[in-house]
Image (tube, grey):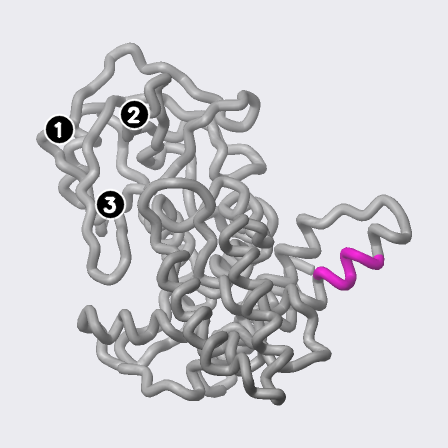
Amino acid sequence: METGLVNIIEVMSSAGVPMDSEILTKRTVISMAMKVRAGKAFTKVDMEQKKLDQMNLMMSSYLADVGYTQMKIPMERDLKAEEFEYIKNHPIISYLMIANLPDLDDNIKTLVLNHHRPHKGEGMNNNYPQPKVLIHKLNVYKEKYKDDPKKTVLVADIQKQIRNILTNNLPMEDIGVISIAGEFASLTTRQAWREAFDPLVAMKLILNNSFFAYNEKTLRDFYDHIGLSLCNNQPFIREGDFVIVVTQDSNQKVFFEVCIIREMYKTQIRPMLERIGTIKPNFSNMGKLRISGFDIASLKLDRRKAVYNLEKNQDPRRIVYVLDSNMDARLYEELTKQTGEIPKESA
């Protein structure tokens, strides 16, 4: 299956098909691969439910961006704030285009509506639309169509969706699958404003932008189940790489630690780490929250060199950033000087 997955991605990249078709197909193939490899079925009933879940995920992935067909999407590299806010409407538009179909499974409609809302939990995140905005817009459409006999299915489903959002009764695992698969598909596809990224670079970019986007399970399912398959069995991080991990103390205060990978395991993003010190990140919000770099002046070295085995222990730390010798040159050079480690060649 690894070879087949790589071949499909490579074929789509060179087939000359429209950009949106390439992204759609890649996203669906990757989503299905993640779902199949993560799934476990022990009985016949389990197997039937798994098949239904897989079919719903496939349909959701195909339909998630259908709303773009009704929108005028800007093609510039740097979007204005209002342009990005306009694009954020596409999950609702996609949902409204399918919500009145009586034979379409309710879970498909839920996934389409929420496919850009993978971050579960409190705190700032890049989910969109945000709950209050989404509920408000759904209520507007419910009022608009409540007396239309041709929209009874739509109105009933809107009520279900509002209830699901208010009670947080959402299929978070599948939402995460579609979202992260779509991000990889987009990064590795040529756009009007940029060339396609190499898969190894895309892997780094996704992880480096994951702090406000994905939970640990979504990341592990992506990197551990299909990460190597998408990169011709080449790891995107290696022993000797510098990484940033995030952790919390007993008072829920968040810390960012600089570490070096000492040993890699099957789980790519749960290696053995050696702590170098702490550092403060810089954040930006140009349409999306992201870690835009790190404050070198805040670097505090720890000579104790504590070791964390993320694979074997229930360690709450998670890698949120992989330093690259080109993209993070200043910090990379400083760490190399301070630790005496030989820089690794970036992907």
Reading the image, the residue beneath label 1 is 298
Residue 135: tell me if it is visible.
yes
Q: Residue at x 46, y 46 (%)?
A: 120
Q: Which residues are magenta?
A: 48-53
Q: Indicate which label's residue lies in the foreground, 2 or 1.
A: 2
Sequence-earlier tag: 2 or 1: 2
Q: Residue at x 84, y 59 (%)?
A: 48
Q: Main secondary structure of the magenta part?
A: helix
The residue under label 1 is which amino acid type? Ser
The residue under label 3 is which amino acid type? Ser
Q: Residue 168: x and y, percent?
A: 53, 49
Reading the image, the residue beneath label 3 is 325
The residue under label 2 is which amino acid type? Lys
Q: Is residue 215 left or right of residue 86?
A: right
Marks 2/3: CA distance? 29 Å
Sequence-earlier tag: 3 or 1: 1
Verify whether residue 221 appears in magenta. Answer: no
SS category of the residue bearing label 3: loop
* Quarter placement of the N terminus: bottom right
Marks 3/1: CA distance? 19 Å
Marks 2/1: CA distance? 17 Å
Closest to the observer: 61 or 294? 61
Q: Check residue 253 in the rendering and tell me which mark sits there, or answer none.
A: 2
Q: Is residue 86 left or right of residue 158?
A: left
